[in-house]
Image: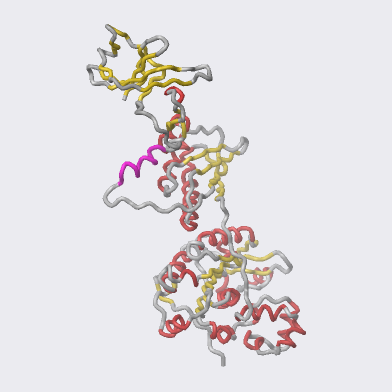
Amino acid sequence: MSPSIPTIPTINFGANQSLCCVPNSSTRNEIQEHHSDTLWLAIHLPLLPLEVFALGPITTPTVVYETSQRPYSIVAVDNHAQRNGIITGMSLSVAHARLTGLRAFIRNHQAEQQALVKLATQAIYWSPNVVVHSSGLLLEIAGSLRLYGGLNPLLAEIKSWINRQYSCVHLAITPTPSSAMLCARHSSSVLIINQTRLVASISQIPVDLLELNQHQQKLLQQIGIQKIGALLRLPRSGLARRLGPAILNMLDRLTGVEADPQITFIPSYRFEKTMECLPARTQVEQLMPWAKILVQALVSQLLHTCKHVNQIDWLLHHADQPPTPITLRLTDERYGEKSLLELTHLAFDAIHLTDAVKKITLCATPLRHIGEQNSSLFSATDMDTWPMLLDRLRHRLGNQQVLGLRTHAEYRPEHAWSFCEPGETDPKHQYAPRPLWLFLKPHILEVIDGNPYFHGPLEVAKEYERIVSGWWDTFPVRRDYYHARNNHHIDLWIFRELNTGHWFAHGIF
């Protein structure tokens, strides 16, 4: 008799069964004997068609049925319905006849696909090779074992992550992707690490779980083939003649004889999610619970994909008016959930709603990965807090009210600077020292006995900087600039106009 399928050891963490971090002795031996280049983890969600409806605690027998062909067949059953004899594959009419008060939902393929894409985006945190299957995910984890300290720590993290989101999860680990998903669909926990034991381990799985057409299923049923082991023992030439050569390719991919390439999931470079506000909200404060959910979803995606954002965009959708756009430009790309919510609250407070909000959308385009900064050992420094202060000021006062300054390659002081985004810089230019406070217009100075005055007589340095520039446009200058100090110890930047000999104060150091 063929051996039974090895199972992943489990321990009880309370109400739910989770992966154990310590395998038994046979499992340890298999890990030591493992020489396969690939190792695939399949995550099968048998109740995904039911769980995407987010029904919460279910007290009424509930099923989900497929409408693609008649009679309508049931594809997912909750525990209450199962205890009353309702099973998957049963027609909907038979289920209603057997159980009065049965609650039924039409299968939502779009919601299932969105849920799987969300999971795949998060799963990239553990493996760069993620495949989206019709009922779950496939992860190639051989390359991640060393990073996470071995198979057990990696499995513990993955099981903890997936159990927080779905109540019914089947996991299987095998050397080939097709066999991993097949085993996950057949059993709740399977561990087959050694390539040589794969065929013997899957021999007891029913052939009904293979992706066969109706003709192939009917023929196998007629000749009495019920298990995969019996199917593998049939002559290959006769099998190809009766069922087609494609079934041989499928079996070879299943057992690892033939390569089984997979289409790797590539996450979207743009985050966009919309939530409906029921009922419509007329006050900004009432929108924050939905904003918090959207920000949490964004931060979760950024965490699992190791990305950052420097701008997020909100859209507040109204019934009778165009959407209200709100843009948050971020100085620090490493903001967490708390900081993003605080800035969102400030930006929302700055708008005046003229119509009720029916839906709210959050959009962001993640940037490439940026290396993490070291945290301060004792307390946050000024450099840790100034980006948040800057963004709070910008979202409270407006982007045009909080600006930075930068220099230009220009000798005339009036034209040597301009406004810019805070933190934006140009290549440094070599100049003599310049005052931080430059007057908007130079102030003419009174001259007494040949000495310029500014709240008292000035002590003028002997060294000067001559600036002769702008002869090609409408603002030519010919000046000698000096450092000067008055009796109140105010350091000034003054100049003497070469054409007229008049003295001016242009700035304060």
Q: Is the residue 63 above or below the residue 465 in the image?
A: below
Specify the segment rendered in magenta: 380-390
The C terminus is located in which quarter?
top left
Q: State whether residue 101 appears in this view.
A: no
The answer to which image quadrant residue 133 occupies is bottom right
Report the predominant secondary structure element of the magenta stretch. helix
Against 347, is 104 above or below? below
Q: Quadrant of the N terminus?
A: bottom right
Where is 352 relative to 413, above or below?
below
Residue 402 part of the magenta-drawn span = no
Q: Residue 208 falls in which quadrant of the image? A: bottom right
The residue drawn where x is 36% and y is 28% is 432
- Is residue 389 in the magenta section? yes
Kindly identify the residue that appears in the image at 56 percent across and 34 percent down: 355
Instruction: Please identify the residue farthest to the left as the structure is shown.
Output: 487
Tally of marks: 0
Q: Is residue 288 visible?
A: yes
Query: x, y (%) of residue 4?
Result: 53, 86
